[in-house]
Amino acid sequence: MDSPKDSLFGLQAEETPAALAAALAPPAAPGHYDELRGGISAPLPDTAAHAAVVGAHALPTRPWARFFENLGREGFGDLNRRTIDLQRQVRDNGVTYNVYADANGPQRPWSLDLFPLIIPSATWQRIEAGVLQRVGLLERVLEDLYGPQELLKSNLLPPALVQGHPGYLRPMHGVQPAGGRRLHIAAFDLARDPTGNWWVLTQRTQAPSGLGYLLENRLAISRLFPEAFRDLKVQRLAGAYRALLESLTAMGRAMDAAEPRIVLLTPGPYNETYFEHAYLARYLGLTLVEGSDLTVRDERLYLKTLKGLEPVHGVLKRLDDEFLDPLELRPDSHLGVPGLLQAVRAGNVLVANCPGSGMLESPALLGFLPALSRQLLGAELQLPSLPTWWCGERAAMAAALPQLPQCVIKETLGGAGAAAILGKNLSRRELDEYAGRILRDPDRHTIQSYIRLSQMPTWKSARSGDHIVPRSMLLRVFALSDGANGWRVLPGGLTRIATSDTEIASMQRGGSSADTWVLTEGEVDPTTLLHHDQPAIDTAHRSRTVTSRAAEHLFWLGRYTERTENTARLARLAIESLNGEDQNSAPLVAWLRELAVANGLVLAGVPAARQGRRVFERSLVAALGDRDDATSVGFNLRAVRAAASAVRERISIEQWNQIVRAEQEFRIGCEALASGGEYSSVEALRVLERLSAHTAAMTGAQTDRMTRDDGWRLLSIGRHLERLAFLAQALASGFGTGALFDEGGYEAVVALFDSTITFHAQYQQRHDIPALLDLLVLDRENPRALGWVAQTLRGRLAKLAGAAPGEPTAVAMPVPDPESWNLEGLCQRDASGRYPATTELLQQCIDASYRLSDELAARYFAHSTDARTSVGA
């Protein structure tokens, strides 16, 4: 009798893994190339007759058979677990893709399929040769269009398509870019037709996306199938990235820069592909910057850092050209750098890719490339484009319109990412409407042949049974600058998989991705993706630069982390006190209300707890998760996530995941509190207790898992500045309301300082002011005491300013020096029984926090001579 393992999926024990895969995988849809079996599945009448036809149970091709042999028969039963592991890995690594970049909504996890696309060595060699030829051709085209423009004069390119395209930048005409090269990165979207031939559908040259995501795909999938990865001799990727960075660095040195600084320019954390911007910056060792981090002075580009302005020699941009310079391009852009094009024209900065390549992304250009290749290269294209007709040419439009039902309609000026309309999905009426639009405005429309995309195997688990499902796919391959040798094709790519109900492979439309395994017959490049094995990448730059923008976000990350912790502790204390044995203590209730209003936990108009305890408590609980109230716990927690998102490249994956989980769990918990119409104080305490555990982990990561550079010092300064103001305000309110002279109020103040255990261990049951001031103000070994906070804050400020140990700095002067504090002076009482010295010190601490915040902004974030001076002064 067969064992469960031997009768896996109902097959016999003698079935090989390859045969098992063939049995589990239905053939590709009729008329599509089957990547698993290496042929066309059930050809349609209009399919080329010479295509190889495969049957439903034909065995996989040799590479796929080897993949499944390494998996083994038992491995099929493990694929669901590996899928779960893959999803967990994507989630834990924080890999996201934001379709609409909603700052308030949850980020969408990156979608990655379990099986890779496998490309044999011989197939890849043909792709590689065709891509190298194409990128060389595009470089020649750009050189001509921004130089002599012979292609326009000889009518090989229509002027309307070039000079009428918004991606053609007239300010760059006649400019020789730094380094002598215009294209450093180019991406080509390839599709395989039913006969097995590869075609170019689109090309991207402004800021191609995918280089970071495909790295993450490789790391994830190679870990899940390590035996197959080694046995199939999959070519590694790191060498191409290193070549790109070395190429940019060498061009920077040619600009008389001994140690050139290369930065990666991102639109910011709300961009849908921001994850890979941060990932690439970390992987390549580049400084991740936004436009506000850079400034142009005397036709040179500079980076705003905590140490002042530092020269920038190269920019790897992830920003479309139109946003680069609001002075000469799009005036409403807040993403670029005013004067950047001027610096580029002066040859003082290398920008990859050089501004002005956007017109190459027009789908209409694909129809002219065969003739351009014959003219400029003297050869036919090795990797052809799909037949494409620009309707601005009357003859092309006349030839294309009758084929509209079998073609794809694209916007001529829309670029590679513009939406495509499939003619086969349109009704007769809709086809007539599109034909009318094309006739009325032919220049704006381009028609391209439709191709049935090849289909690759994907693993799907369903109630009806686990099986392999064929899905349509596109392959994006990249050509990267390789110094004097020209370009190198990255041996892999970003494979995008269509959803089950469409043939459009787009991540924005809910598609998925897959790793791309390029096999080699020779030696595998030994360079790995691990940083310690890539000294050329890791040591490309000096010590890590802290930009002013990153420093400001780190500063506010510290402040909002502390605010979240403080307000959550205060909310817990208030709920516990209002339901405890001291709930009738007037001073305690007055103190709680004063602090709750001051910290935004309740509105000022809410009745005091003495007048309506349930109303006050209900208002407090209801406002916990309010993400629009600028001082609620929910708002502060969301602000923590926003600040951390802006510096993703500087914080660990674990720390980011902790922040995301804290925000999500707290939001869900607060939503559940309101679901029944009544707010439970018991449930509210549980939500706050869970948040307390999260904030403890967050502050622990900030303390123990971050490098002690100036960015971390500003994060720490932000936390301690916030703590100084909060605790001083709480103590001052305790004196003002009389809570400190009430037993319940006294204990509550000590609890808010998180010092209950320490206090009772040292002072037992004493409830006098000297004992309280000694522990909560003077004790410089208690991290919740004002003396410790002030001392730490002054030390961090001195280190940030570069002062010698013990030497005071101007920026630290507002913070009271705990060396001058003494218990005897603080305990002196006036005739009214008040403590004037203590009250004055507490007010000094509160005022110092506000003043210090302004001083830091002016000194480190504004980069102006005097940020406090107005224009009209």
Image (cartoon, helix red, strand yellow):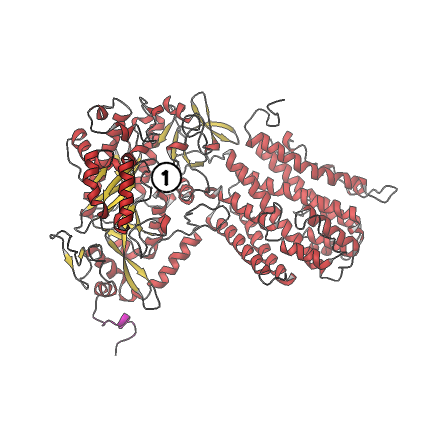
Residue of label 1? 535
For the C terminus, the image quarter is top right
- Foreground pick, 243 / 745: 745
Most common secondary structure along the magenta stretch:
loop
For the N terminus, the image quarter is bottom left
Q: Quadrant of residue 114?
A: bottom left
Q: Magenta segment, which residues?
A: 1-14
User: Does 281 sit above or below residue 666?
Assistant: above
Residue 102 part of the magenta segment: no
* Image mark count: 1
Q: Position of residue 813 (x, y in %)?
A: 67, 32
Is 473 on the left or on the right of 838, as rendered? Answer: left
User: Does 168 sit above or below residue 618?
Assistant: above
Is 857 on the left or on the right of 127, as rendered? Answer: right
Furthest-left residue in view?
50
Q: Is residue 383 visible?
A: no
- Foreground pick, 435 / 696: 435
Q: Position of residue 24 (x, y in %)?
A: 25, 65
- Foreground pick, 473 / 536: 473
Q: How many residues crowd mark 1 within 10 Å: few (<14), some (14–19), many (20+)?
A: few
Q: Amino acid at mark 1?
A: Pro
Furthest-right residue in view?
831
